[in-house]
Amino acid sequence: MDGAHIVDGTTTASCPAENHAGSGPNVRSLQKPGLAVVDSGHVTVSGLEIRHFCMGVMLLRSHDNHIHHNVIHDMVGAAGIMITGDDGTAAGGSTKGLSTNNVIERNVIHDTGDGGEHARDDEADRDQQRSLEYVLYYCNRA
């Protein structure tokens, strides 16, 4: 594996922003997820422990997915779970109606930059965002 894909668990620098202006939480990044569901639908992710990535699970322009009963922790970069309609361009524009009907429930998420994140939606997607069922459990490290 080349160095471009390795996540250094001691620094957010290995999780760069898409525009290379920063790293870690609260920057636009699609880099180095543990699992990525991209331009797809009807995927279930369940029963996994995911750790030491830039983000745990990324749903990119994807629909009708079910993410449940996972333990996601010790992310160096951003979200434990991220749902985004990012168009993938340098500017990071929104898409319309592509990130819809995803159910995220009963996951244990801790020690991440952001627990869960929904980004790059537009007015049409905001109604779909409200239909998402988020039942996330956050806990502190013992």
Image (cartoon, helix red, strand yellow):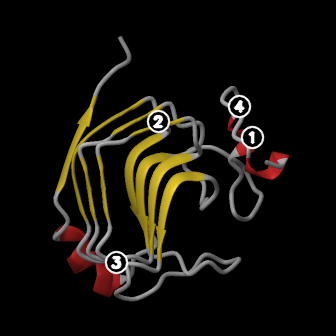
Give residue 30's quadrant in the image: bottom right
Tags 3 and 4 touching, CB below 8 Å:
no
Q: Secondary structure at mark 4?
A: loop
Q: Which residue is mark 4?
A: 11
**Residue 137's quadrant in the figure?**
top left
Task: Tell me, for residue 119, which label it has, or none.
Answer: none
Look at the numbered discs 2 and 1 and tell me whether their residues touch, using CB distance below 8 Å: no
Q: Nearer the viewer, residue 22 or 84?
A: 84
Q: CA distance from mark 1 to mark 3?
A: 31 Å
Q: Residue furthest right?
A: 2
Circle 2 is placed at which residue position? 112
Amino acid bearing label 4: Thr
Left/right of residue 47 with respect to residue 59 in the rendered view = left
The residue wearing badge 3 is: 41
Image: 54 above or below 95: above
Label 2 secondary element: loop
Kind of residue at badge 2: Thr
In the rendered structure, which amino acid carries the disc numbered 3?
Gly
Badge 3: residue crowd in 10 Å (few <14, some 14–19, many ≥20): some
Residue at 55% across / 53% down in the picture?
33
Tell me where residue 135 appears, x and y as whole percent: 17, 47
Marks 3 and 1: in contact by CB < 8 Å? no
Crowding around mark 2 (Cα neighbors within 10 Å: few <14, some 14 to 19, many 20+) is many
Across and down, in percent, residue 24 comes to 62, 43
- CB contact under 8 Å: marks 4 and 1: yes
